[in-house]
Structures are given as C-alpha cells and as structure tokens.
Image (spheres, helix red, strand yellow):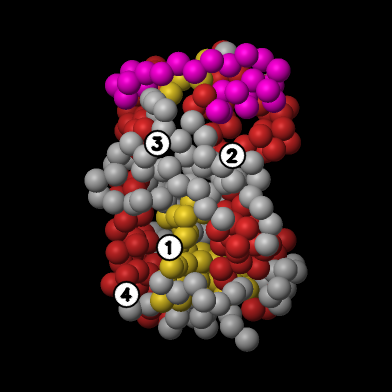
Amino acid sequence: MTTIAIAGASGPLGRGAAEQALKTTAPEQLVLVTRDPARLADFAARGVQVRSGDFDAPETLASAFAGVEKLLLISTDAVGRRTAQQTAAVGAAKAAGVRHVAYTSVPNPSSEHPTGILAAEHFATEEALRASGLAWTFLRNALYVDIQAQGWAHAVATGQLVTNAGAGRTSYVTRADCAAAAGAILVSDGHEGQAYDVTGPELQNADDVAATLSAVSGRAVEVVQVDDEAFVAGLVAGGVPQEMAAVYAGFGTAIREGLLETQTDVVERLTGRAPTSVSAFLTEHREALVG
C-alpha cells in the first residue's frame, strides 16, 4: 500500500486534508508532519503516524519523510522565508525517496505578480519542484472565503465594502473545499504534472459580494472603490504593517487585472461534491459576520 504524508499538517488545511484522506486510507498508511506533534495527538490516537519535522531545520525532514511515496506539501505562513523553507523540503523529499509531491500554491504565480513576494515564493517553489525530477501536482487555491469573511464582517459593521479590485471578478473558495481537494489528490492516481485551479462555484465582483453581504446580514452594504495607494493607506491606518498592506492590496490589483478570474469544477471532480458558495458559507457563519 502507498504511504502518504502531509507536511504542515497541524493547521486547518492540513487537518482537513487528513480527514479527507482517512475516508479511504488506513490510518497507519498516513504520516502527518508537524513542528509540534502534540497538536496532532488526536490523530495519533487514531493510529496515524505523527512525526516531527521543521521547515526551518531541513535536517529533520529526512526522517519525517522516510518511507513516504506521496507527499502533500502545504505552503508555510512564513512570508519572506518560504522559498528557502520549501525548496529545502523539496530536496529532503527527493533524498528520502518520495515519488510524488503535491503543493498548495496560488493562481497564476509569477515573479511579477501584483502580490509581490507572496506569489513569487509560490512560483519559486513550483519551479523547484519542476526541476527536482519528482512527479508534481500544483493545487492553486483561489482566495479563501474564510479569510475574506473577516474583512467582510467589517464591511457589514460599517456599511461599506472598500476595495481596489474595480469590476474584476474572482471565485472565492472555502478552506474546507481546498482541504478536501488536497486530500483527494493524495488517495487517487493520475494527477502527475497537473496544475489545478481550486475555486468556488461562481465568479463574483465587489458588487456581487456586497449584495450577498446585504442579503445575509440584513444590513445595507455599499461598494467603495479606491485606488491601490488609498487602499494601502487605509490598511496601515488600521494597524496592518506596510509590507503586508501592500500584499493585500496586490490581491485587489490581481483581481482587477483579471489574474484571478478563474472558475473551475476541480473541487467537484476531485471530491464528488460541489464546492460551497459564498452565500452558503456566510449564512452558516452569519453570527460571526454580523457580530
């Protein structure tokens, strides 16, 4: 039987992917790699192999990946250090004899992407995998509804959805749907050399989102369009560090320029069920949306 592994397994995406994989895989055939094995004690109690591995200490990854044939490499949250971390992980996977690596990336990654270093690091990791000689699959996850909803709650509270995305459209996806797709990749064949855009069920612009927010919350929300500079200034005034404010503004720019205007049936093809819509997600989490 194939031994599969998830690196970066203790976060919500990793845990969700593990649950998906366990639907069809024996616990002893699943390896979960994390800096803090105690955080995955519940999986260990179910018979899953939990191993210690730290992306900042590549020497720990050789034993963590030992005996693994297929690996889900979940991108870290260490923006600015991820190229070094993740290329080291690719090297460790190859040295350990891993055959196939699936990596969680972003749509249209490049060194010239409006989000700057964020997309550039994904691009560099994809290039490292292409050059490694390993079989690879890229899971290019669209913007998470879960993360956007935090800002949307502010829009509901103020009655204004401030954006620099213009009339651009994108297909927001839930983290749970991305996790399910990733887990499905681990337990099925035929994905080598594929780059999948993992999206929600519909393309939406800011007006569409505002209409959904209004309908779900029962409060009127209007769209306020601003330029990139004003968007960054607003975030900084709200306490967001300048560098990260520029990254967030870059997503709006990317939407405006059509770089994120992709909608696919990947979630349904991989998992057998349709992805969750923005409206359904917000309805389910209405209490958090309205405060």
Q: Which residue is mark 2?
A: 146
Q: Is residue 217 magenta?
A: yes
Quick check: 220 above or below 85?
A: above
What residue appears at the point 34 percent right and 51 percent down from the top-left corner? 109
Quick one: SS at disc 1? strand
Q: Which residue is mark 4?
A: 132
Point out residue 43 in the picture as x, y percentages from the top left corner.
Answer: 70, 64
Task: Residue lying at the far bottom in this picture: please name it.
Answer: 1
Q: Nearer the viewer, mark 3 or mark 4?
A: 3
Q: Which residue is mark 3?
A: 255
Q: Is residue 146 left or right of residue 126?
A: right
Of residue 262 and residue 78, the one placed in the foreground of this image is: 262
The residue range painted magenta reads 208-231
- How would you rate the neighbour count of disc 2 (Cα within 10 Å): few for under 14, some for 14-19, many for 20 or more? some
Which amino acid, by three-letter code, is at mark 3?
Ile
| Quadrant assignment for the N terminus | bottom right
- Write down the quadrant of residue 272 in the picture: bottom right
- Earlier sequence position, callout 1 versus callout 4: 4
What residue appears at the point 54 percent right and 15 percent down from the top-left corner? 222
Quick one: SS at disc 4? helix
- Write down the quadrant of residue 138 in the picture: bottom left
Which amino acid, by three-letter code, is at mark 1?
Ala
CB contact under 8 Å: marks 3 and 4: no
Q: Is residue 65 magenta?
A: no
Quick check: 212 above or below 6?
A: above
- Earlier sequence position, callout 2 versus callout 3: 2
How far, Cα to Cα, is label 4 from label 2? Answer: 33 Å
CB contact under 8 Å: marks 1 and 3: no
| Quadrant assignment for the C terminus | top right
Of residue 67 and residue 224, the one placed in the foreground of this image is: 224
How far, Cα to Cα, is label 2 from label 1? Answer: 23 Å
